[in-house]
Amino acid sequence: MEPLTDTFAAMSLEQPPPGHRASDHDRERAASVVQEAHSDGRLDFEELDERLTQIYAAKTQLELRTATADLLPVPHGSPAELTIRAKHSAQKREGAWHVPERITALPEHSSVKLDFTDAIVHLREIHVEARPKHSSIVMIVPAGWSVDIDDVDMVGSSATNKTGSPSSGGVRLRITGEARYSSITVRHPRKRHWWWPWYRK
C-alpha cells in the first residue's frame, strides 16, 4: 500500500492555492499524515495532539500545509538554496513560489520583497541571510509563523519585526546577516479594506 505521506505529496500538486478554504476531507487527509508520523516515531504524543488540534481548527489550505510541512517529502528537483541579487532594481518573490531551506538576499541600492503568504513551504524552518547595502528588504509572513531577527548586524540600519507573538507549531523564519544603511521589515499581510460610497438622493 502506498504510504500516506507519498499520497498526500502527490495530491498536493493538484491542490488549490494555499489561501483557499479547507474542506473536511482536506483536514482528514492531513490528520492521516500526522497520525502516520506518530505511529512510526517521528512525533510524540504531545506533538500529535498539538498537530491534530491545529489541523481540525484549520480553515485554509495554508494552515493545513503548515501543520504537515516537515512530515512530507520535498518534491524532487526543489532547490535547497536561493540567492537573490539586485543592483539599482527591485526583486520580489510572491504567489505560489517554492520556498527553499535557505535564501540569501544581496540587494545594493535596491529593494527585495519576499511574500510567503501563498508560498509553498515544505519545511519547519527557513533561513534568510540578509545582506542589504543602502537597500530595503520586506518579508511578509502568514499568521502563526515565528520570526527570529536578532542575529542581524546593523550598521546605520533598522530591523523591525511587526508580527507580534506567534502561535506554537508554526514555521520558524530565522534571519541573519548584516545590514548597511538599510532597512529590514517583517510583517503580516495587510488587511483589505472595502469602501462603499454613500449616495444621497
Image: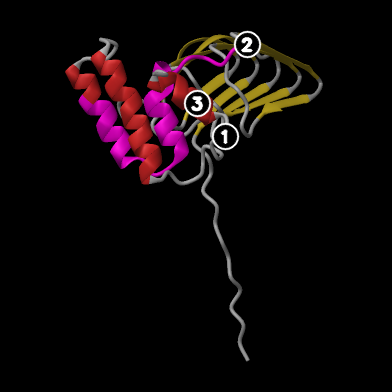
- Is residue 165 shown to the viewer in this render? no
Q: Which of 78 and 101 is in front in this view?
A: 78
Q: Earlier in the sequence, mark 1 or mark 3?
A: 1
Q: Mark 2 points at which residue?
A: 79
Looking at the picture, which amino acid does disc 3 mark? Thr
Residue 82's spot in the image, x, y percent?
Answer: 65, 12
Q: Residue 160 carries which label?
A: 3
Looking at the picture, which amino acid does disc 1 mark? Glu
Q: Is residue 57 magenta?
A: yes
Q: Give the farthest residue toward the left.
A: 45
Taking 165 as reference, is 198 above or below it? below
Q: Which mark is residue 14?
A: 1
Local packing at callout 3 (Cα closer than 10 Å; few below 14, some 14-19, many 20+) is: few
Is 164 positioned to the left or the right of 10 in the image? left
Residue 133's spot in the image, x, y percent?
Answer: 69, 13
The CA span between labels 2 and 1 is: 20 Å
Magenta-colored span: 49-78
* SS category of the residue bearing label 2: loop
The CA span between labels 1 and 3 is: 36 Å
Q: Which of 122 and 175 is in front in this view?
A: 122
Is 17 positioned to the left or the right of 28 in the image? right
Residue 43's spot in the image, x, y percent?
Answer: 26, 15
